[in-house]
Amino acid sequence: MQKRQPMLTWYVALSPMITLWLFAATALHVRRIFGSWPDNAVDHAPTILLALNILVFKWATLFGLFLAGPLWISLLFYPPARRNFYSHLLQAVSLAVGVISLFWVPWIVDSKYVTWWLD
């Protein structure tokens, strides 16, 4: 008998949205460290915590963009992670909105706020 893990699919489906929150946290950290929005990319972080924040954001971005979708679909075939149809439909919508937002949000904000990342 396998233990049910119904929240596992929700964690994967919400990972792109969590990545957006990490983007906002990283942006606020960059702003706080430099005192203003940097014009160039932040290649060498001046503090270890900012470097860690950027690293976590990069890994979350890679997971949210490239692994979340295939992993979520794979989990649908894993019986302990299954939920009802409407729950999975809501998860699919939140996953799609999150992935689209990861591409869309950095381009709709004013460029001075994201040049440190887009360079």
Image (cartoon, rainbow, N blue to C red):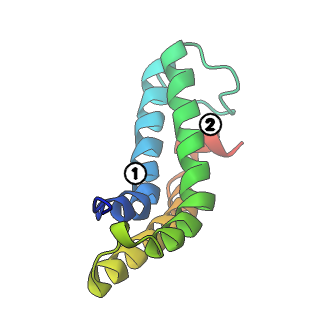
Quadrant of residue 44 in the image?
top right
Instruction: Say which residue label 2 marks.
Output: 116
**64, above or below 22, in the image:** below
Q: Residues within 10 Å of mark 2 (few under 14, many from 20)?
A: some
Q: Is residue 51 left or right of residue 87?
A: right
Q: Which residue corresponds to the image point at 53% horizontal and 56% vertical from the top-left?
A: 64
Q: Nearer the viewer, residue 61 or 109?
A: 61
Q: Distance between the residues labelled 1 and 2?
A: 20 Å
Q: Where is residue 87 in the image (x, y as percent from the top left)?
A: 28, 78
Q: Residues within 10 Å of mark 1 (few under 14, many from 20)?
A: some
Question: SS of the residue at dot 1?
Answer: helix
Q: Which residue corresponds to the image point at 41% horizontal and 33% vertical from the top-left?
A: 28
State which tag comes first along the sequence, 1 or 2: 1
Tell me which amino acid carries mark 1: Ile
Q: Which residue corresponds to the image point at 34% horizontal and 74% vertical from the top-left?
A: 82
Question: SS of the residue at dot 2?
Answer: helix
Mark 1 vs mark 2: give the one in front: 1
The disc at residue 18 is: 1
Q: Where is residue 85 in the image (x, y as percent from the top left)?
A: 31, 86
Q: Nearer the viewer, residue 35 or 99?
A: 99
